Amino acid sequence: MAKYIRIKKSKNLRFRLISILYLLFISLSIIQIPIGWLRVNPNLRTTLLSFDSESKEGDNIEGLKKRIKTMESDFMAFAGSDPLTGDLLNPENYAQTDQFFLEGKKGEELFLALQALDDSVNQLPENNSTRIAYLKLFQSDLEHGLEAKSHQSWTSWKFSHVPATVVQLQMADLLLKLNLLQGDLKVEPAGNGDSPELVLAYNIDELHIGDTAYFVYQGEVRPKLELTVGKGKAQNYDWEKDSLVFVALDTGSYKLEFQLGREQRSFQFEVLPGNFNSKSYNAPEAYYSGLPFYLPLENWQSQLDYSCTCMPGRTIQAQGNKLRVQPSRSGWCYIKGMDPKLQALAFEDSVYIHPLPAPLVYASGISQNQISRTRLIQKPEIDLKVLFPGQDEAPQLDIKEVRAKLYGSFGEKTVSSPNKLILEATDVKGLSYIEIEEVLIQSPDGEMKISDRLIINVLTHEK
């Protein structure tokens, strides 16, 4: 019998992949469980604590309720909380839960108090309504150590690696069960029943002209809305089922007050000028001086009067849903749009304009950088062109001067001429090749010197 079993490589890789996916599933499960609790915990805890019992009978239950409340206060002090709001400083931390309830034996202390209640209830007849209710309410606790009288099992199930904020929920859950066990419940909401509970569904700290803010209310009665700040400004709002859809059409401060009964909620925010929606188009990596580019506009933005700092003395106008800008200098370009009707700033944004990069220079009418001597004798000059690759519209560039070296039977000679390379008849005779050394260009960004060498070979036969 062989000592080893040979496994195919593909099968081994499949086993490894399955193992990695399993570990990933376990990791994500561990990460997501506390987060889910953190999101629902505040509302659940408030709801659970809103129930209280009018019955003051049952000294065991009342004593247990006081002990739970005291233990929760002790835990909040141990874990650390904000003195003003009472919120936990580190709600996701579970190390403090383990230290307080497991290492500090507070979990065992709470278990013994529940155990005393369990012993008292078990003495009641099986058909007793209190005993039946107890078995239903504390079924999970009984299954995880309370019935077996194992404080290790119960405290580990209840508090091991539990985030601090979930401890508050568990304490509220115990209090609710004890109140239900006492019976004769009444509801004591945290506030007035007519309080408009509103949820803001948009980040009003970053609200621009044309953006939409949603205010959602809970309940069957729609609250009364009053615009106390910004009443004279242009805005548009409407109710859609349980949401107020608010669109600001002017910049400045706004304050909305919602009132229902004696309770009211207010929201105050600033509306900023509109800006470019970079998500609606593929922005280039950079903008360059002298090269035109287009910026996307929304429908309402195309009606504004625009100006910018990179085109001094010139106006820019929208072309459909785009704004064409051809900067004449580099640096930050601040673009503003004024509403012609309101005579107010409605748009403000900026883009950075880079200095114009060195363009490519090529000889016009010459193939593969070769020209015949006969052609030069007929026309002793060479036109040069400037090219920016990948640009639909080239900027206005003027060649001011061309400097070159001539090589031939006469040796070496340096020449320069404005606008294009101009040769003398004596230079063409015996000429072997031309080296363009420098081209001086006048660009929107100022003078630019291109020093890339360009070699033009002179052929003795016709080309």
Image (cartoon, rainbow, N blue to C red):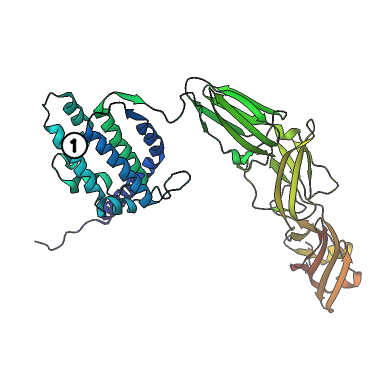
Q: Nearer the viewer, residue 329 or 182?
A: 182
Q: Residue at x 13, y 42 (%)?
A: 148
Looking at the image, residue 411 sits to the left or right of residue 153; the answer is right
Q: Is 351 drawn above or below residue 382 in the view shown?
A: above
- Most distant residue in the bottom direction: 411
Q: Which residue is mark 1?
A: 117
Q: Residues within 10 Å of mark 1 (few under 14, many from 20)?
A: some
The answer to whether residue 231 of the structure is visible from this angle is: yes
Q: Residue at x 29, y 49 (%)?
A: 22
Q: Nearer the viewer, residue 361 or 463?
A: 361
Which of the image's four quarters has the N terminus?
bottom left
Which of the image's four quarters has the C terminus?
bottom right
Q: Position of residue 165 (x, y in %)?
A: 37, 44
- Most distant residue in the right direction: 425
For label 1, the SS is helix
Name which quarter of the figure residue 362 lies in. bottom right
Q: Amino acid at mark 1?
A: Leu
Q: Position of residue 238 (x, y in %)?
A: 60, 23
